[in-house]
Image (tube, rainbow, N blue to C red):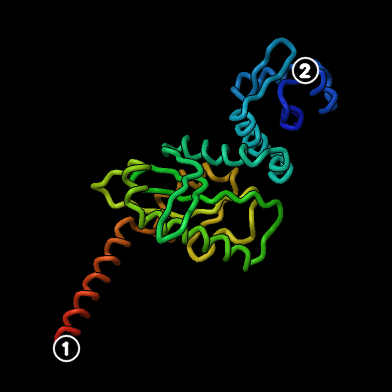
Amino acid sequence: MSVLKLTVNGQIPNDLISREANLPLRTTEELLSKLQNEGLISMRGNLVEVTFSQRADLGAFAVQHGADPLTVSALLSWQEFESISAIAFERNGYRVAKNLRFRQGGRKWEMDIIGMREPLLVCADCKQWRHGLNLSALQRITEAQVARAKALSCSPSMLFEKLKCNRTERITLVPVVISLIATKSKFYSGTPIVPVFQLHDFLNQLPLHLDTLLCLSSGACQKTGEQQQHKSKDLKRERQKIF
């Protein structure tokens, strides 16, 4: 925790960490050596360096070893929170696209993170709230994310050209909300709300639980459009009969 707190602005000497953690310098050096062996920090003499991605890993490591997620999250920036999410996707075999902007249905949309492991496309909205939310707020947030995922499912140019999805496969889109802390509700209308430090396990188990989640198909819009075209043609024929 002390390393996360003190490395926000760059490298720091190990004796500063020792004082902040209220530990003997020898003990601090041993712990820092273990963190370096885990790839979570870098040491140059008595200076400790932590890269952007290492801070994300360090936050996850701290939570896994008993640190309070709320306390850890308070030490992470928005970009680091997003980076933790992206790393979890990558470690589960997903290709990742971040901050995807696109137009569909006459308006602009933006998706925080898209994880791709075809035929699955996980559409994630990262929410850095630091307190519980009431049901109406969760409803608004999840419904907005479902709308984004639906818009993406109706955009072949984004799916097949920008994101390089396989045109021969029907893509299954899963809207997800990623939070900094756990909420009382883990789902809302089939949309999961996943604490960021549980995201790795969620993604690992996701293929086994798709039947319990709200899933969208990349072909749904095309079918809807074809149905509307058929209806339009039928209506035109009826009008021609009348006139």
Position of 131 compared to 157: left or right? Answer: right
Q: Is residue 90 above or below residue 194?
A: above
Amino acid at circle 1: Phe
Q: Is residue 177 visible?
A: yes
**Residue 13: mark:** 2
Q: Element under label 1?
A: loop
Query: Which residue, given by chain and number where applicable, does mark 1 sit on?
Result: 243
Relative image position of residue 123 (x, y in whole percent): 46, 50
Q: Who is closer to the viewer here, 122 or 231?
A: 231
Relative image position of residue 145 (x, y in whole percent): 51, 58
Q: Who is closer to the viewer here, 243 or 77?
A: 243
Q: Earlier in the sequence, mark 1 or mark 2?
A: 2
Q: Identify the residue at horizontal 17%, vertical 89% (top origin).
A: 242
Q: Nearer the viewer, mark 1 or mark 2?
A: 1
Q: Identify the residue at horizontal 56%, vertical 55% (top origin).
A: 193
Disc 1 + disc 2, Cβ < 8 Å: no
Q: Residue furthest left?
A: 241
Residue 96 sits in quarter: top left
Q: Residue furthest front?
A: 243
Q: Residue furthest top?
A: 45
Give the spatial CA distance, label 1 vs label 2: 87 Å
Q: Is residue 103 above or below residue 38?
A: below
Amino acid at circle 2: Pro
Q: Identify the residue at horizontal 77%, vertical 17% (top origin).
A: 13
Relative image position of residue 3 (x, y in whole percent): 73, 28
Q: Is residue 212 visible?
A: no
Q: Identify the residue at horizontal 67%, vertical 35% (top origin).
A: 62
Mark 1 neighbour density, 10 Å: few (under 14) some (14–19) many (20 or more): few
Q: Give the position of the N terminus as an image quadrant.
A: top right
Residue 188 sits in quarter: bottom right
Q: Residue furthest bottom?
A: 242
